[in-house]
Image (spheres, coloured by chain):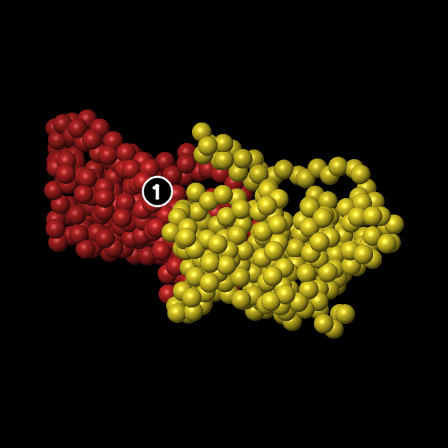
Amino acid sequence: MNAIYILWLRQIKRYFRSKSRLLGSLGQPLLFLLALSFGFGPIFQKAGGGNYLEFLAPGIIAMGILFTALFSGIEIIWDKQFGFLKETLVAPVTRIKIMIGRTLGGATIAMIQGIIVLIIASLIGFKFSIAGIIPSLAFMFLIALIFTALGTAIASMLEDMQGFQFIMNFLVMPIFFLSGALFPLGDLPESLSVIIAANPLSYGVDGLRRTLVNAAHFGIGLDFAVLIGTSAALLLIGGYLFSKIEI
Amino acid sequence: MRENAIIKVSNLVKNFGELQAVRGISFGVEHGSIFAFLGPNGAGKTTTIKILTTLLKPTSGEISVNGFNPLTEQNEVRRSFGIVFQDPSLDDELTAYENMEFHAVLYNIQAKLRKSRIEELLKFTELWERRNDIVKNFSGGMRRRLEIARGLLHHPKILFLDEPTLGLDPQTRNHIWEYIRNLNTKEGITVFFTTHYIAEAEQSAGKVAIIDHGQIVESGTPEEIKQKAGSKSLEEAFIALTGKEIREERVGTKEVFRRSHQMWRRG
């Protein structure tokens, strides 16, 4: 066993032991899936958009991953407050390894979350390409990695949970709503299109849509390239900020 | 004495912006000794420990821990010491055994040795029966014992204890001190500790340094300090040296957060 593995394992154990967290994190995607697909489904169909659940489900999978991943990253604040971070920081392990282990752990949890949402969606009638499952997992993992690293970067700069609400409202919600998770990107006003094109989650949602229901806006090659580039950049930034933590 | 010192500090300074937390302190801790670092709240004790344990970088001054420089030889320094922090630092969601295992892997202790050492230390701290319990359900004394066991897992040369007995009842305090003295005599581990219970220092420490406002105001054996101050107990000497004024520790957002979390948990 090495340091990265044990840090990863710790995150996984904590996730599966916290039953309330497991269940609580499923409520929101389930609500979105049910309310939106049944609520907007008929209008979407009449407007010629096809099956709304098919369109929506990849977006909600991405949402589940986004929320879980950011929270996992932000768990560092928790560890700062309750002292456990000190235990890892005085150990003879480089900060980069600690950051990588934690981030991989958080990303794995977020990916599991995405898979669970996929299962729930299929239970309420979401039909997807079986062959697309494996490539969709790659997209889920990239989305998870990006936002865990982003959460780590943010948490490394914050002292406590005070700034957390601010982040939720001014970062997480805009990332979700302005990603094409809920609506098609075809005929949008120019300004909105620009914002959406600058949002990495848009490419994650697009990639999931392409692999699961064979519909795409940007194209799978671009999706993949943007996600890889963004995750590399955020891992570097997160790693740098994490290595600067003093407690 | 400086020649035989396992911890050497000279002219150590640490500033946080305008605030001078440590103002040029110098001291040495001998191999295999028990050293008490005493001072009122906010005197600079924890800051000094954080610098010695590579958590903070000093503003200036020279330090050496087990012959290594905490600034340039971080990993060598980190392998040399074990630490019990002032605030808890266990993972509440893991079991006692898992907390130990996590530490052992971080310190790169091989699988076979890992098992036998964890068992030995959990038995030593009388926690072996509870090894598979989640730490959340442990009492304050059990957590402290587990932290001490964890701090010893990689066989450190030095054990740092930042107020190891804070908030514990006298029985548990005695128990823990017995362990520590035992370790010191049997294993020859150097112990560096801070405490607010001055009597503990008087009982256990070979040497004492008293720090106030970031400077060392007195140091020596408990006997020497008492003689110099002309007092009957070390506590009297401590008060004579540091004054009667009550120090307010700055309560950071961290503390506020921790308290509110505890309330929420109990509710």
Chain in yellow on the image = B
- Residue at 28% x, 45% y is A113
Give left or right: position of B181 versus A9.
right
Q: Which three-letter amino acid code belongs to the residue tagged 1?
A: Ser
- Residue at 78% x, 55% y is B222
To which quarter of the image does residue B41 belong?
A: top right
Q: Residue B227 in the image: state x and y as whole percent.
A: 86, 54
Instruction: Please say if B231 is above or below B67.
Output: above
Give left or right: position of A67 versus B66.
left
- Residue at 40% x, 64% y is B115
Residue A163 visible at all: no
Query: What residue is pinned by disc 1?
Result: A18
Q: Quadrant of the N terminus of chain A?
A: bottom left
Farthest residue to the bottom: give it: B3
Q: Residue A179 in the image: state x and y as whole percent.
A: 30, 40
Instruction: Please say if A25 is above or below A206.
Output: above
Circle 1: element type: loop
- Residue at 53% x, 59% y is B151
To which quarter of the image does residue A127 belong?
A: top left
Q: Residue A233 in the image: state x and y as whole percent.
A: 41, 56
Q: Nearer the viewer, residue A135 or B30?
A: B30
Q: Residue B149 in the image: state x and y as whole percent.
A: 51, 57
Q: Nearer the viewer, residue B87 or B30?
A: B30
- Check the rendered structure and report the hue given to chain A: red
Give left or right: position of A79 versus B14.
left
